[in-house]
Amino acid sequence: MSGFEDIREQMEVIGADGVHLGTVDRIEGDRIKLTKADSGEGSHEGHHHFISRGLVADVEGNQVRLSANADVAVTFEEEESGN
């Protein structure tokens, strides 16, 4: 079991239910910045999204597991403005 400081670029971010939520672009402060490729559709497309450190439950292998299911975790995502 590892912590937030073990998160690296290109790791998969999954919800507590095992559903893919995104891919780590990089860490910015206390947030995980997801790649634009995982930004969603419609008005969310083409924007970076961020996951708060507080949602990270575990880091194991090449996966970051969140404490919330994927469908709930997306409601906590922050969207980068201007990019």
Image (spheres, rainbow, N blue to C red):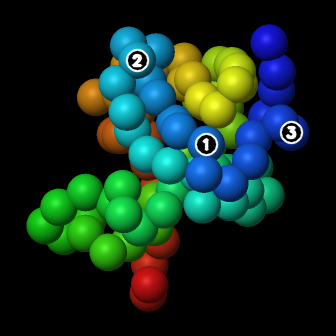
Question: Tag 1's secondary structure?
Answer: loop
At label 2, the amino acid type is: Gly
Q: Which residue is mark 1?
A: 11
First reached walking from the N terminus: tag 2 or tag 1: 1
Q: Quadrant of residue 75?
A: top left
Question: Tag 3's secondary structure?
Answer: helix
* Mark 3 neighbour density, 10 Å: few (under 14) some (14–19) many (20 or more): few
Residue reaching furthest bottom?
82
Q: Position of residue 17 (x, y in %)?
A: 38, 13
Q: Which residue is mark 3?
A: 5
Q: Quadrant of the N terminus?
A: top right
Q: In the image, is 63 to the left or to the right of 72?
A: right
Q: Residue at x 46, y 29 (%)?
A: 14
Q: Quadrant of residue 18?
A: top left
Eyeballing the image, is 41 above or below 46? above
Whole-angstrom CA distance, mark 3 to mark 1, is 13 Å
Q: In the image, is 35 to the left or to the right of 2?
A: left
Q: Residue at x 70, y 21 (%)?
A: 60
Eyeballing the image, is 82 above or below 58? below
* Mark 2 neighbour density, 10 Å: few (under 14) some (14–19) many (20 or more): few
